Image: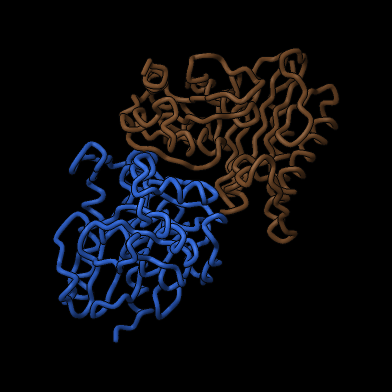
Chain colours: A blue, B brown
Amino acid sequence: MTDQLELHEKISSWFHSARDQILNSKQTGLNVDYKTSRLDLVTNMDRGIEKFYREKIRENFPDSNIMGEEGQKDEFRSSQGLFWVIDPIDGTMNFVKQGTHFASMIAVYQDQKPLLGYIYDVINDHLYWGGPGLGVYRDDQKLTAPMDLALADGLLGVNGAMLMHNYRNVQTAVKQSAGARIYGSAGIEFIHVLQGQCVGYLSHLRPWDYAAGAILAESLNLIVKTIDGQPLGMVESEDVLVATPQAYRQITGIMTAES
Amino acid sequence: MTDQLELHEKISSWFHSARDQILNSKQTGLNVDYKTSRLDLVTNMDRGIEKFYREKIRENFPDSNIMGEEGQKDEFRSSQGLFWVIDPIDGTMNFVKQGTHFASMIAVYQDQKPLLGYIYDVINDHLYWGGPGLGVYRDDQKLTAPMDLALADGLLGVNGAMLMHNYRNVQTAVKQSAGARIYGSAGIEFIHVLQGQCVGYLSHLRPWDYAAGAILAESLNLIVKTIDGQPLGMVESEDVLVATPQAYRQITGIMTAES
């Protein structure tokens, strides 16, 4: 069994080094490229930070398998030992346009079981981390599970395109909530749900967008599944809903009803 | 002519005292009431902070007229001398549900002309302030006017209900932008536009929601008008758009086109 605190000490030091590199990019300059569309950005920083994490993982845990947003994607399904999921910069649009409201994320599994998740709010310098064994922390402060609020009692984070197109009737869920919020970064949205600041968050996500958040959320008794009630597959894009148990039931009830 | 820096010294001290009272409410407890609906909240803190500002204004500038969200609303139209517009807590839903992402705002006019505007990001302890005479500051640091970006080059803050209902075709504007954001506080949204983090912000607002932001935005060469191109009346609710000159023209072009 890997010593989790020893692992944590290493990983958290990588985040602080990543922060220095990211802040430094204000001086060194940012190169922005398009991936699939003008709204799907990647920068030299996304690539550089992923490369940095990969090197650190290889150096410290040479037998690891790795899935990263910007690079090689090992298979989760058959992996034994340590498996890492990396999102170097989550919310690249916010990073480029706002210089804030983005996250850097790492998830670690052992023999396909969740071990540790990390969401780093880079600009505000807060690290949300932990797992089923250690509990969940904001920096050094242990978080308690958020109250199991009903949909009507909380704000709902939603993907903007889903909200605009009333995807699977999501607007009905929003109208039953205390209001919609769009922050533009899955990591930042997960942080809100972990802290009870939103009652849920719904988006179409890939494994590196949700892996770390799912480990943290499940460790705080939140529900993280597809809106059809399936466990997350760690393979493809999925409609992911993280929410309090009450809000999860209510939202999926609305979004899976026959229309 | 009132000495603006002397005025500023007084007003900024009120905000710091308001912050102490607001942070203290975590201990003393919060009473939440509904105003017009379950989504229109008011707390003892909204009322207490407005009362505090009113007392400070009366004490220091006894001949003032005052319009406040939670209390008496003097007429702007006929007012001479100092006129104050107060929003003690803007984004009360965020204040109640999230404990952050809300603002406290004051606008000051002299003989109906903009003098000073204040948006205080309470939790992050940043004061955005200034006016046509002094320029605009974030705490002690002078802000430069944001670049005149086109709609395609920036994020667009939007009111959630307007976005869901595709009010006056706003979804077309969003699709031409780099994406929609919903933060749930006019003050916080204005801050993003002032700093160039969003290219515009559109919502249905009352005078206390937009007065301070409008003074600051116009002092940074941004456009703040109704989406029909009318100046803000300081009387009723209006569809307010604050944006860079380019984005203002593009958004109003879309939203005022015959459909």
Q: Residue furthest front?
A: A259
Residue A12's image quarter?
bottom left
Q: Is residue B67 above or below residue A140?
A: above
Frontmost residue, B181 versus A13: B181
Q: Position of residue A222 (x, y in %)?
A: 45, 68
Frontmost residue, B243 versus B135: B243
Q: Where is residue B259 in the image (x, y as percent from the top left)?
A: 36, 19
Q: Where is residue B53 in the image (x, y as percent from the top left)?
A: 76, 37
Point 63% across, 47% down: residue: B38
Point 47% across, 52% down: residue: A156
| Apparent side of residue A25 relative to residue A175 in the rendered image (left or right) | left
Point 40% across, 33% down: residue: B156
Frontmost residue, A38 versus A3: A38
Point 66% across, 15% down: residue: B113
| Apparent side of residue A256 relative to residue A208 in the rendered image (left or right) | right
Q: How many labels does the image show?
A: 0
Confirm whether residue B39 shows in the render: yes
| Apparent side of residue A36 relative to residue B226 in the rendered image (left or right) | left
Frontmost residue, A150 versus A144: A150
Residue A77's image quarter?
bottom left
Quadrant location of the N terminus of chain B in the rendered image: top right
Confirm whether residue A17 shows in the render: no
Q: Is residue B159 above or below residue A246?
A: above
Q: Position of residue B147 (x, y in %)?
A: 38, 25
Q: Is residue B40 above or below residue B224?
A: below
